[in-house]
Image (cartoon, rainbow, N blue to C red):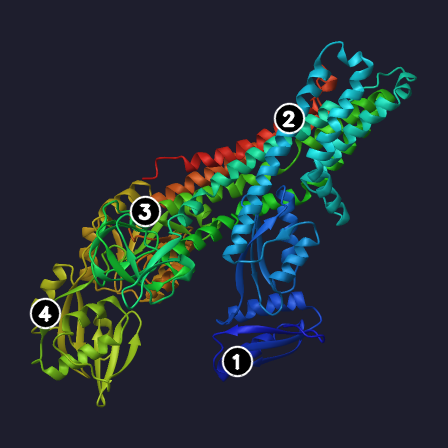
Amino acid sequence: MKSLNNTIYLPLERVDSEHCAMIVDKGLGEIPEIKQHRVELNNHRAAITTDDPDVAISRSVAKIRQLGYGVSTVKQSFPVLNLSCASCASSTETILRAQQGVLSAVVNYANSTAQVEYIPGITDPQRLRTTVQSIGYDLAIDETPEAAEALASLQQSHYRSLKRRAIGAIALAIPLVAIGMTPGWMDQAWAKYMMWALATPVVFVFGRQFFVGAFRQAKHRSANMDTLVALSTGVAYLFSVFNTLFPAFWHSRGLHAHVYFESAAVVIAFILLGKLLEERAKSNTSSAIKKLMGLQPKTVTVIHRDGHHLQIPIAEVSVGDTLLVKPGEKVAVDGTVTSGTSYVDESMISGEPLPAVKQPGDPVFAGTINQKGIFQFKAKKVGGNTLLGQIVQAVQEAQGSKAPVQKQVDRIASIFVPVVIGISVLSLGLWIIFEGSAGITHGVLALVTVLVIACPCALGLATPTAIMVGVGKGAEQGILIKDAESLELAKKLDTIVLDKTGTLTEGKPEVIDIHWIEPQSQELRNILYSIEKSSEHPLAGAIVRALEDQVSFLDEVTVDNQPGQGIIGNYKGREYRAGNIALLKKKNIAVGGRPQRWIDEQLKLAHTLIYFADDNTLLAAIAISDKIKPTTEAAIHNLQSAGLEIYMLTGDNEETASAVAKKATIAHYRSNMLPADKADFIRKLQTQGRTVAMVGDGINDSNALAVADVGIAMGPGSDIAMDVAKMTIVSGDLSRIPIAIRLSKKTVATINQNLFWAFIYNVIGIPLAAGILYPINGFLLDPMIAGAAMALSSVSVVTNSLRLKWDTTFK
C-alpha cells in the first residue's frame, strides 16, 4: 500500500526473526534512492520512503532476494482483448511493465495473454486493467468460472463476427474486381460510381475495426497493424473518391483519373480472411491445454455418510469428500482409494499404456480413467491443487513465456510500424520527385502497397506459436516445460549429470539385511527407529519400514540432520549416528575389523550401506537395495548415442557408486558427493564451456538443479526439486529426456524457419511494393496481391508451427 508521502510497503517472506530483519534493513540502506527505511517484523513488511518509487522498488526487491529472503508477489495470467498484431502486444507489455509495483510482464500475441508478476498493495488487477484500457486494449481480470465462460462466449462471438465480416467483404469484393478487370467496363460512366457504392461498406462497415483501432492508437501517439491497414485502404479510397468526383483535375494535366476502389476493398477482404484463418490456426496451437482441461469431468458422484449418492458439479468438491468412480468414468480430483479394486489408465501422467491396479490405500489422480471395477476414494487435493491442475497451470505459463530470441523480435516489432510508415511516405516522395505530377498516381499506389504488405503479424507469430505447440507437445509426452527459455536452451546441451537415487533407480529402497556388530537390544532398535523416523530421506524411510513392527518410538530422542551424510540423535545424554561413512569419520569411529567381510559382500552387490554407531563404537550396518529402473539402460544409451556426455553423482560410497554406474553403463561418476559438491561439480563443467543439464528428484538435488543450465526434476520426487527445475518428467521415466532434447531441437528449428520467412517476406516485399523494379522492367506490385501475400504470410507461419504438433516421431 502506498501513502501520499511516497512511503511504499513491501510484503516480506522468510523474514521471521530480529536477525533476519536486521539483515534486510541493512541491505535496504545500501540503495541510494531510498531516503528512509524500516522492517516491520510484526507486519511482515518493509517500509521504504523514496522520491523515485519505480527504481527503488525494483532495486529493493533485487536486494532482498539477493540476501536470501523474498518479497511476496502475485503471478497472474490475464486474457488480453483487442490485440490485432505483434505491435499491439508490445505496446501492452511496455505499459504494464511501466506500472509501479509490476516486477515483470510478458504479453503473448499468439494466445492473447499477459503474464504479470506484481506486488499486492502497490498495484492490483483493476489498476492494471485501467492502464491497459487507456491505450485501447482490455484485460479480463475476473477468474470465476462464470467469467471464464463469458470470456469463451465473447471469443466465440468475436470469431463469428470476424467470419461474417470476412464473408461480406469477399462477397462485395468479387463484383468489384469483375468490374475493374473487365475490358470496356471501366470506361462506362456508371462503373466508377458502382465501384464506389460496393467499396464503401467493405471499407467502413466490414473494415471498421481497423479505423477504430488506428484512431485509438493515434490518440496515444502510437501505431500498429490497424494503423497500416487504415492508412493504406483509407488513402486508396479517398484518392479514388477524388478521382471519381473531380476527373478534370487529372485530365487537364494529360493524365487518366485512375480509381482504386477494388484495391481498397480486396485488401480489406484478404486481411479479414487472413485474420480468420489465423484465428483458427492459433486455436489449434493451444489444443494441448484444451485436451488437458477436457480430462476432468464436469460432475462427480459424492457419497454422504448415510451412503446416499448425489451428483454435484466438480467445483463443489471439497477435501475429505468421498467420491464414487464407475467403469469408464474419469477421476475428478486427487485422492486415496478407500474401498474397491480397479484398473486405472494413468497414461496421461506416466506414459505407461498398461492400466495400473488400484486398491485401498493407493493414490489416484485427476484426469485418469477408470477401466474396470468400481471404487471409492477420499479427495485429498481439489481444483488447481491437483496434479492435473498443476500441469495445466505449468503448461499455460510456459506457453505464455518468451524465448530469448523473442526479445529481439519484440524490439524490432516496436519500431516496425513507424519505420514502414516512413518508407511508404518516402516512396510517395521519390515517385513525385522523379516523375513529377505523373508520378502521383504511382506514388499513391506504392504508398498503399507498402503499408499493406508490411503488416508485422507474421513476425509476431513466428516465435510464440512454435513455443505454444512445443510446450503442448511436451505435455502430451509427460514433459512439463517451465518456460520458453529452457525449451530453447535444451538443444544446446552437451552434458547430462544424473543423481542416482530416484533418477537411475526406482527410488523405492528396501532393507536387505541389518548386521549387528554389537549385541542388539530392544533399546538400540528403538533408538535407531526413532532417529530414522525423524528423517525425510528415502533411505531412512526404508529402515523405518523394516523396523516398525518390532519397535517403539522414543519421544526423548532429539535429532540433528546432516545433509548428505545422515542424522545425529541424542538420547539420555548419549550421541548416536545413523548415516554414511563420512558421518562416522567425523568422530573417528572405525568401520573395519569383524564386519568388513560382510560389508565388502554388500558393496559388491551394489547395496547402499547405512552405519549405526554410538559415541565411539559401530553398532550395526544396514544394507539397502534400490533397483535400477528398467528404462535406465536404454535411456542412457540413447543419450550417449546423441553425443551427450553422462555423469552420475551420488552420496553413496565408491564401491556402490561404481557398481551402479557399471550396471547403468555410465563411464563417469563421482561418489561421496554432498549437495554442495554436486552444485560445485556442475559449475566446474560450466567453466569448461559445457551446457549442463542436472537430473534429480530430491531436496538435496535442488541446489544442483538451480545451478545447471537446465534443471530436470523427476515427477515422483520432492516438490522443492520440481519447483526449482526448468523441466519436470511427470512419470520419472529417464527415457523422456532424449525426447525432451529432440523436442527442443525441433521447436528451435521451427522458430528459426518462421523468423526466416517472416523477415525475408518483408525484406523482399517492401522494396517490391515501393516500386524498386519499375525502372528495370516496369513492374509494380498491385495492392490486392500485397494484401493476399500479407494474409498468407501469417497463416503460413502458424501452419509451419503446427507441423510440430502433427509430428509423429515423439514416441
Residue named by callout 4: 596
Residue 318 drawn above or below residue 562: above
Q: Position of residue 185 (x, y in %)?
A: 76, 12
Please give the name of the residue rendered at 22% of the width and 78% of the height, measured from the top-left corner.
531
Residue named by callout 1: 21
Q: How far is disc 1 from disc 4 in space, using C-alphas?
A: 52 Å
The answer to which of marks 2 and 3 sits earlier in the sequence is 2
Res 433 seen here = no
Q: For mark 2, give the secondary structure.
A: helix
Q: Quadrant of residue 713?
A: bottom left
Q: Considering the image in quadrants, where does the N terminus appear?
A: bottom right
> Are the residues at dot 3 and dot 1 in contact (C-beta closer than 8 Å)?
no
The answer to which of marks 1 and 2 sits earlier in the sequence is 1
Q: How far is disc 3 from disc 1 in space, using C-alphas?
A: 44 Å
Q: Which mark is residue 170?
A: 2
Q: Nearer the viewer, mark 2 or mark 4?
A: 2
Instruction: Give amino acid for label 4.
Output: Gln
Please rate how many residues cluster around mark 1, counting C-alpha atoms within 10 Å: few if below 14, some from 14 to 19, many from 20.
many
Q: For mark 1, give the secondary structure.
A: helix
Q: How far is disc 2 from disc 4 in space, using C-alphas?
A: 88 Å
Please give the name of the residue rendered at 80% of the width and 16% of the height, measured from the top-left corner.
190
Is 554 placed left or right of 185 in the picture?
left
Instruction: Give amino acid for label 1.
Output: Ala
The answer to which of marks 2 and 4 sits earlier in the sequence is 2
Instruction: Give amino acid for label 3.
Output: Arg
Q: How far is disc 3 from disc 4 in space, using C-alphas?
A: 40 Å
Instruction: Give amino acid for label 2.
Output: Ile
Q: Nearer the viewer, mark 1 or mark 4?
A: 1
The answer to which of marks 3 and 1 sits earlier in the sequence is 1
